[in-house]
Image: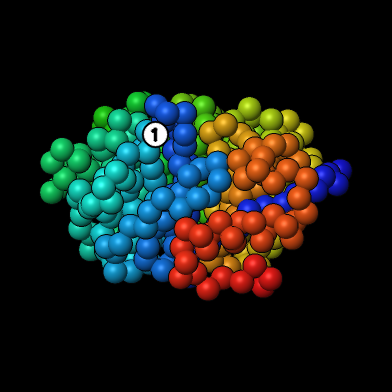
Amino acid sequence: MQSNAKQTPLTCIGHTRPVVDLHFSSFTYTGDFFLISACKDSIPILRRGNTGDWVGSFQGHKGAVWSARLSRDATVSVTGSADFTAKCWNNLTGEITATLEHKHVVRCVDLTSDARCVLTAGYEKVVRMFDLRAPTEAVKVLTACDNEIKTALLDGEHGLVFAGDGNKLCVWDLRTSQQVSSRGFDADVTSLRFSWDRKHILCTEGKSVHFYNALTSALEKSYVTEIPTSTASLHPKNDRFVVGGSSDLWVRVYDWKTGEEKEVYKGHHGPIHCVSYSPDGHLYATGSEDGTVRLWQSEPGIAYGLWEKHKGATASEMKKAYFKLARDRHPDTSMDPNS
């Protein structure tokens, strides 16, 4: 059963190539939250989470940036790149605070909650953990991988690492550096993501979305969709989840209890590589092969962010208002609101 609600997504300009990863911070001490996006143009972008307003661009990588993560308080970013490095950034100054050298492409990164330790993985088929207080050498190296690692998660509180090793979801115990479980699938794992309460891990592979208990790794729910899934995110209220597809231009929202498809929206002009709900649950962000980040309302039509400023406006009016704001702040932009 699909919703007929009118959805007016906001398009965040700035990237010039496919957007392959994005991540929201938690709430900062001011009550704000932020969004970082990783792109093949080599320049991650930091934005305000509720409006998509540009905050800053991180320049320093010399290859595509495949992964980006924010600390919970949004003061630290970590990025992984095709230039064989992961970089840590001070978000207040935009300066690089550490460069972690690798021997091959870094496809995924993650941070502990205190932003002291960084996880990296990629084409070397190993998972590394660095302590940012002394980042010259990895403090942990997990080597029991058979394939390039394209997605991984770090649970620093419980000492666990989750990684997509080809068509397997593997779990390591950091205390022993040993692999403690492995689950096989018919297709390769395309994404792993924590729920906002960090009680669940969402795993996408083939046309399926699986929900695992983050502490025991037990499978709690599994749904088969109509599309090859590339990414999924669970709403903070744990009542719905959004899915993007590797060969589909549509954003799809499903009921978490039943797996029923509730909403379908079109806005992107290329496959959707990444999705994430915001910490307040009012919106979700999507990144696409078309080089854009789009923000979508969880409850279309309510007053929130830029939607509050232009409540009642048509989609065309919303689009023109957003591009006017972008031009006011970045006069050199060449984006056409009529395109």
* Between 267 and 223, the one nearer to me in the picture: 267
SS for dot 1: loop
Relative to 330, is 99 above or below?
above
Q: Position of residue 15 (x, y in %)?
A: 47, 65
Q: Viewer-proximal residue, 300 or 291?
A: 300
- Kindly identify the amino acid type of the residue bearing the numbered disc 1: Arg
Indicate the quadrant where residue 219 lies: top right
> The N terminus appears in which quarter of the rendering?
top right
Residue 93 visible here: yes
Report whether residue 207 is seen: no
Residue drawn 47% across and 28% down?
Answer: 31
Is residue 280 left or right of 148 when viewed as pictured? right
Closest to the observer, 22 or 108: 22
Q: Residue at x 65, y 37 (%)?
A: 304
Pick whichever, 251 or 129, lies toward us: 251
Q: Image check: 99 left or right of 149?
A: left
Query: What residue is shown at x 39% (from left), y 27% (from top)?
Result: 29
Q: Say which quadrant the C terminus sits in.
A: bottom right
- Give the mark count: 1
Q: Sort mark 1 into few (<14), some (14-19) or many (20+) by Cα contacts within 10 Å.
A: many
Q: Is residue 291 left or right of residue 93?
A: right
Rendering coords of residue 186 (x, y %): 59, 54
Say which residue appears at 80% left-offset and 48% top-offset. Answer: 6
The image shows residue 258, relative to residue 294, as above or below, that is above
Return the x and y of residue 322 as percentages of the image width and height: 61, 56
How are the colours assigned in the image?
A: rainbow
Residue that mark 1 sits on: 72
Along the horizontal axis of the image, is 72 left or right of 59?
Answer: right
